[in-house]
Image: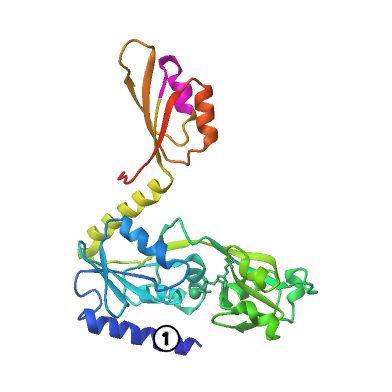
Amino acid sequence: MRAVRIIRINVLTRYYIMTNYSAPNGNGRLRIAVQKSGRLNKASVELLQKCGVKFIRSKNNLLACGQNLPIDLLYVRDDDIPRLIASGSCQLGIAGGNVYQEERLTEAGDSPSFPTPLRTLDFGQCRLSIAVPEGSKIKDTSDLNGLRIATSYPALTRDYLASRGVTADIVLLSGSVEVAPELGTADAICDLVSTGQTLAAHRLIELQPIFQSQALLLGGPEIEPSMQSLLNMLLARVDGVLTVNESKYVMLHAPANKISEITGLLPGAETPTVLPLEGNSGRVAVHAVCRESVFWEHLESLKAAGASSVLVLPVEKMLA
Ligand code: PRP
Ligand code: ZN
């Protein structure tokens, strides 16, 4: 299984380098590995588009070239992303914490070139969980002793079971893990759960979450000095995108003598701008960027404190 995977990466990497680059890091372009299909694909590409990179996807669908910035995307299997960064074929990658942690627990994780998480992104939330068939005698992790558990995450599963002093046979499957109990190839599974629909459809009960995951922006421990400023710019833009996801621009009118009470009610607001209103009404306009979600409850509290004409606007871009 491992051997097959290593060969596949090498072929992919060689093909990529042959068709686009004379050597890794050779052309001053920043390469980012993203999942080619699956739960992270769309959000990963959207994040980079929100950072202002305009991509054109190549005919072979393996690559997308940045038109306005020297940043390219390489579409790969998510499991390959940590190793593509470790080998220097890509400088960055977006992968789930599940994939990253699984790989970190293998031999590859000992390499000094193994990537590190640069940012935790705001999507791809899921958990790796042990699940058992409805009506199973397995009621607790300890009941798995001596039984078979199917998973695509052998290292994380083994690590968790070992921490609980449990020894089970790991049945390694690269997909469709949820059908293993029905087929009689395993007594339990350890797989990703997001909405829980897959478990329900296969009459499996979630027994124990073992790892919480979300998307990570991964980077190698070192980057070529010539690419450092491009990387810094991209990271600042990623931070900007992550901040505006929650941020809102709030405008309201308030009694001048209630400013501190009103601004105290604005979630995650920094020093607001206070502007006089026409005429001598004793009221002022307050403008503030709220860096936390603004809910109806916040608006109701503001109104109760004397605010009026409350407007909440989305923030499109923000650079700290
Ligand atoms: C995962 C997992 C389940 C499904 C669970 O697969 O293997 O099949 O998602 O999601 P749910 O709780 O919302 O039903 P994924 O789509 O990540 O594909 P992969 O495991 O092949 O990478
Ligand atoms: Zn996967």
Q: Which residues are magenta?
A: 253-264
Q: Quadrant of residue 226?
A: bottom left
* Callout 1 amino acid: Ile
Q: Residue at x 31, y 46 (%)?
A: 317
- Kindly report the secondary structure that dominates the magenta region of the rendered protein: helix
Q: Residue lying farthest front? A: 309
> How far across and how far down the image is residue 240, in percent?
34, 49
Q: Is residue 146 left or right of residue 107?
A: right
- Asked if residue 68 shows in the view, the reply is yes
Give the image's coloring scheme.
rainbow
> How far across and how far down the image is residue 98, in percent?
52, 68
| Residue holding disc 1 | 6
Q: Nearer the viewer, residue 122 or 2?
A: 122
Q: Quick check: 242 above or below 54?
A: above
Q: Is residue 107 left or right of residue 67?
A: right
Q: Residue at x 63, y 84 (%)?
A: 171
Q: Is residue 245 left or right of residue 192?
A: left
Q: Residue at x 45, y 77 (%)?
A: 108
Q: Quadrant of ligand 1?
A: bottom right
Is 258 covered by the magenta stretch? yes
> How far across and how far down the image is residue 315, in percent?
36, 43
> How far across and how far down the image is residue 109, in percent?
46, 74
Q: Nearer the viewer, residue 246 or 307?
A: 307
Q: Nearer the viewer, residue 211 or 300?
A: 300
